[in-house]
Image (cartoon, grey):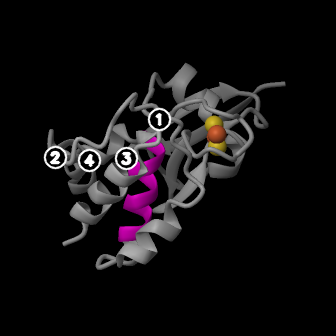
């Protein structure tokens, strides 16, 4: 059964008729055409679907959409403000951290969440924050270098 929910995503208000228990990821991708968050495992384990909810990293594949009513959701797209990339996004480009790129949404959102609360994060803190974000290409070294570049 659908309900009318009001969501705040990337600083915009959306009024949507959706099932309240559907994963947030489905609504972002299918209803709002925000394809930064990726579908990986669908189980909350890989991190590909990560978004920010009130500035904290969250896995959109396992969050019911109704749970983010009244909260601020930010996607990879929403990190861009007035056409300017977030410094974390820019760092990942500058470090050429992508191989296939599928995991990068989760990597970038996780680093952004960490830097929101710990702007001068250490290499150990970055590594710990990214511990549960999976990269099947094995580009973890480049990803960690990009994350380090985003600090400062
Ligand atoms: Fe959400 Fe893997 S798709 S954690």
Q: In this view, does 71 lie to the left or right of 142?
A: right
Circle 2 or circle 1, nearest the eye: 1
Q: Percent from the top left, x then y, of residue 3?
A: 74, 31
Determine the image quadrant of residue 31: top right
Closer to the camera in the image, 8 or 21: 21
Determine the image quadrant of residue 144: bottom left
Residue plotted at (74% across, 40% down): 43
| Circle 2: element type | helix
Closer to the camera in the image, 147 or 61: 147
Instruction: Check residue 77 in the rendering and tell me which mark sits there, or answer none.
Output: none
Read off the residue under disc 1.
Answer: 137
Asked whether the beta carbons under mark 2 and mark 1 sit within 8 Å of each other, the answer is: no
| Circle 4: element type | helix
Instruction: Check residue 92 in the rendering and tell me which mark sits there, or answer none.
Output: 4
What is the distance, in whole Å, between disc 2 and disc 1 at their CAs?
19 Å
Q: Main secondary structure of the magenta part?
A: helix
In the rendered image, which quarter contains the N terminus? top right
The stretch of residues the image draws in magenta is: 105-115
What is the distance, in whole Å, between disc 1 and disc 4 at their CAs?
15 Å
Read off the residue under disc 2.
Answer: 94
Label 3 crowd (10 A; few <14 / some 14-19 / many >=20): few
Closer to the camera in the image, 152 or 69: 152
Q: Percent from the top left, x then y, of residue 108?
A: 38, 50
Label 4 crowd (10 A; few <14 / some 14-19 / many >=20): many
| Circle 3: element type | loop
Q: In this view, does 34 lie above or below 123?
A: above
Mark positioned earlier in the residue sequence (3 or 2):
3
What is the distance, in whole Å, between disc 4 and disc 3 at their CAs?
23 Å
Residue plotted at (50% across, 66% down): 129
């Amino acid at each position: 059964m659908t309900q009318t929910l009001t969501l705040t995503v990337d600083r915009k208000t959306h009024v949507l008729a959706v099932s309240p228990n559907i994963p947030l990821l489905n609504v972002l991708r299918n209803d709002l055409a925000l394809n930064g968050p990726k579908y990986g495992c669908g189980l909350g384990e890989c991190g590909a679907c990560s978004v920010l909810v009130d500035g904290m990293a969250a896995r959109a594949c396992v969050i019911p959409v109704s749970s983010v009513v009244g909260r601020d959701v930010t996607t990879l797209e929403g990190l861009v403000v007035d056409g300017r990339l977030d410094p974390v996004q820019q760092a990942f480009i500058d470090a050429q951290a992508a191989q296939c790129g599928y995991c990068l949404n989760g990597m970038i959102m996780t680093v952004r969440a960490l830097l929101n609360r710990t702007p001068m994060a250490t290499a150990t803190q970055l590594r710990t924050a990214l511990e549960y974000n999976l990269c099947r290409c094995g580009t973890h070294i480049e990803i960690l270098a990009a994350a380090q570049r985003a600090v400062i």
